[in-house]
Image (cartoon, rainbow, N blue to C red):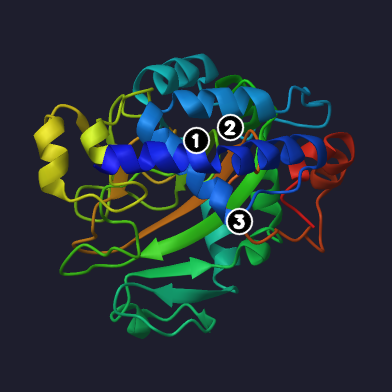
């Protein structure tokens, strides 16, 4: 019955979706929530083949001008990363970020405000990081625009090795879409708000997420979990997809995937995790200590879910200025 309902809605709403898809292609004006939900329903029905078609229509073919860009690390094997991303949906690179650079970033974060969040947290005000308040929340998230003022993050976001990997995997100009950093704290049970239940992402037609561990991540302090190959077309069983964009209980996952499919991605601080989060994933709850990481997202277009525009940093590195001037389409998410 649910399948028939989805097909009916897809037929009825298809003119709106096609018109808004064309408008975005011409003017970069994002779609309505109706078309965004339509894209998700299409994914549920087609298993991802619709994303391929939408992405091929919208993606930016322009190359990146790399003249001013330098690698951030010598420890990102781009060829291996692309191979593993295509095959399994994720790739982990150890020792990507040196201890000194991590300390510089952590010291910068100490001066920034953020928001506490979790299933039991109602307060949305900004605060300085406070270990006492941590005990009643699940997560502390920094403001994206504050993060962009950090010179080390600007260089990291626009590093040669990450951009080349994103471009090769996406087969498109990588558009900077998300810049985030957050702490996760111990809890007695998994937290829905903090994405500690299985789910897939679907804000855009195609994207790549980059996670950088700023402290050691083991099985006790919230490793990332990913179901290998679930990023592929029909990689998520229809009996899971049919529930749409929602959190998924463990018993449903266990019905369609084996323990060998589920990967617990631990790593030392400085590790870089590349992932196509169209695949099924979650953050395991923290049992002790804490976890802090950076996250960037590079997308092939901004068509889909509405998000708040990023602000251009007030204090831009020379690299940021040059990349902005030479590759303006990469900065569509900024104003």
Residue 111 picture quarter: bottom right
Left/right of residue 20 with respect to residue 287 in the rendered view: right
The mark found on residue 96 in the picture is 1
Q: Earlier along the polypeptide chain: callout 2 or callout 3?
A: 2
The mark found on residue 84 in the picture is none
Give percent across and percent down for residue 64.
Answer: 77, 26
Please name the residue shown 40% across and 46% down the image.
269
Which residue lies under the disc numbered 3? 306
The number of callouts visible is: 3
Marks 2 & 1, CB-CB < 8 Å contact: yes
In this rendering, the answer to whether 85 lies above or below 194 is above
Please name the residue shown 60% across and 56% down the image.
306
Please name the residue shown 48% across and 81% down the image.
124
Residue 197 visible in the displayed image: yes
Give percent across and percent down for residue 125.
Answer: 52, 84
- State how far apart marks 2 and 3 are (Cα): 33 Å
Q: Secondary structure at mark 1?
A: loop
Give percent across and percent down for residue 178.
Answer: 59, 50
- State how far apart marks 1 and 3 are (Cα): 32 Å
Marks 1 & 3, CB-CB < 8 Å contact: no
Which residue lies under the disc numbered 2? 73
- State how far apart marks 2 and 1 are (Cα): 6 Å
Please name the residue shown 60% across and 28% down the image.
55
């Amino acid at each position: 019955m649910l399948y028939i309902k989805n097909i009916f809605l897809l037929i009825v709403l298809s003119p709106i979706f096609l018109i808004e898809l064309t408008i975005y292609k011409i003017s970069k004006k994002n779609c309505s929530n109706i078309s965004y939900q339509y894209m998700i329903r299409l994914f549920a029905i087609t298993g991802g083949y619709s994303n391929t078609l939408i992405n091929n229509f919208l993606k930016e073919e322009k190359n990146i001008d790399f003249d001013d860009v330098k690698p951030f690390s010598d420890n990102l094997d781009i060829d291996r990363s692309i191979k593993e991303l295509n095959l399994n949906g994720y790739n982990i690179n150890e020792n990507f970020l040196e201890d000194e650079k991590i300390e510089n970033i952590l010291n910068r974060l100490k001066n920034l405000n953020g928001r506490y969040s979790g299933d039991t947290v109602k307060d949305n005000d900004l605060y300085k990081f406070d270990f006492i308040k941590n005990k009643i929340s699940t997560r502390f998230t920094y403001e994206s625009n504050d993060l962009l003022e950090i010179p080390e993050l600007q260089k990291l976001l626009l590093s040669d090795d990450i951009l080349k990997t994103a471009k090769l995997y996406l087969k498109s100009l990588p558009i900077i879409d998300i810049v985030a950093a957050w702490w996760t704290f111990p809890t007695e049970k998994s937290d829905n708000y903090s994405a500690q239940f299985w789910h897939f992402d679907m804000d855009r037609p195609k994207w790549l997420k980059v996670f950088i561990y700023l402290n050691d991540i083991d099985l006790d302090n919230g490793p990332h979990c990913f179901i290998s190959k679930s990023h592929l077309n029909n990689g998520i069983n229809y009996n899971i997809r049919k529930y749409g964009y929602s959190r998924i209980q463990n018993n449903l996952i266990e019905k369609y995937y084996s323990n060998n499919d589920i990967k617990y991605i631990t790593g030392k601080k400085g590790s870089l995790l590349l992932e196509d989060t169209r695949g099924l994933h979650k953050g395991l709850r923290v049992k002790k200590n804490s976890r802090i990481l950076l996250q960037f997202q590079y997308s092939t277009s901004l068509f889909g879910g509405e998000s708040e525009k990023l602000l251009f940093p007030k204090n831009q590195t020379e690299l940021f200025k040059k990349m902005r001037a030479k590759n303006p389409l990469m900065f569509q998410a900024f104003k």
